[in-house]
Amino acid sequence: MRHFYLLSLLLIVSGCAVTRTSNDFIFPTKEGKAKYIAAYDDTMKSLWNVPFKEEDVPTTFGFAHVTISGPAHGEPVVLFHGTDASSTMWFPNIKAISKDYRVYAIDYPVEAGKSLMNLPDLSNKQMIQFFTEVFDWYSLQNINFVAASRGGWIATYLALQPESRVKKLILVSPAQTFGGVDKKGKALTAMVLKMFPDRAKLAIFFDRFSFYPEKIDAKYKEQFYLANKYGKSKPGLTKMLQFREKDISSLKIPVLVMVGDHDVINNVKVLEKAKALLPDCETAVIKNAGHFISIDQSETVNKKIVDFLNKK
């Protein structure tokens, strides 16, 4: 398969296949893009506390930016981040997950991040193709998915495809997966921040979405703020339809679902639904955690993720 992508890369570079490959669709100004990328790199340098390499994988839709950590021959884990959070959001979790696993963190291409695209948006069908081409590039089979928020919906959608390669699915407060938004008023602070970004609204957002907003590292907060200030990502909510119960019930793989007890997106009742629908499911309520549960309670979440991955 790799020869196909090398050909695609040559076509992209030559301009024969696409007219533009960049994240100008997301960052319309060079100044905004430069500031965001500098903040992204600062987050990685300061907070990604294990060795890593960054690669840009050619796809039909441009380049997928992938951050890789962990032993070369470790079982694969793919990380799916939340909206505008980018792969850097996993900084409190990467050391635990990558100790024994080969971890691939992929920036979703139509959001703030470092993936470079030739289209302003992706359909669900194109999204499947995008991730499939990345998996093919690394020859990944029997993949463990760890996914947060919108990334949880994406990972579930991929797991439901007929030729899914997913071995285990770990969902960290997945959006639109087992129900709609729980606390709509508080959740709207995310949209307000995106539409009218300033420091005060950023503080309100983190106060609503995190149980310990004061403990979130300032470098990551700055990156997230710049994603909203300069980025023009599309949440794609119209494509994130809630899954039918019969579809969820068709997932035969082991699934772990976690939500925070102060989560604005999911309440604990979604765990009852998950348990009832999924044939092989474990659930957990993470105490003293908001929607950013992988940051709010990283030690607890890390242990549950690793224990679930290690379970035979």
Image: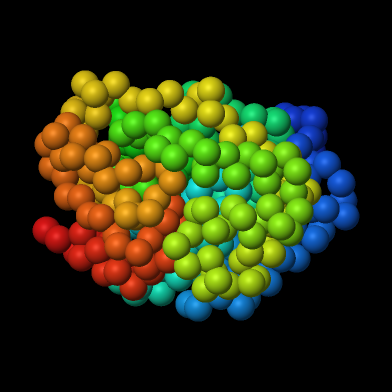
Left or right of 300? Residue 149 is: right
| Residue at the limit of the structure toward the front, as seen here | 185
- From this view, report whether residue 39 is shown above or below residue 30: below
Judge whether residue 312 can be spotted in this image. yes
- Where does residue 12 sit, x and y in percent of width and height? 72, 38
Question: Which quadrant of the structure image shows residue 3?
Answer: top right
Residue shown at 67% from the left, 41% from the top: 192
Left or right of 42? Residue 275 is: left
Residue shown at 43% from the left, 35% from the top: 181
- From this view, report whether residue 267 is shown above or below residue 288: above
- Where does residue 169 sit, x and y in percent of width and height? 28, 47
Q: Look at the image and name its color scheme.
A: rainbow
Q: Nearer the viewer, residue 26 or 142?
A: 26
- From this view, report whether residue 177 is shown above or below residue 54: above
Residue shown at 27% from the left, 39% from the top: 270
Quarter of the rendering occupied by the C terminus = bottom left
Q: Nearer the viewer, residue 39 or 168?
A: 39
Residue shown at 66% from the left, 56% from the top: 202
- Where does residue 56 sit, x and y in percent of width and height? 62, 53
- From this view, report whether residue 73 is shown above or below residue 122: below
Left or right of 213? Residue 138 is: left
Task: Give the total of numbered labels.
Answer: 0
Left or right of 188? Residue 277 is: left
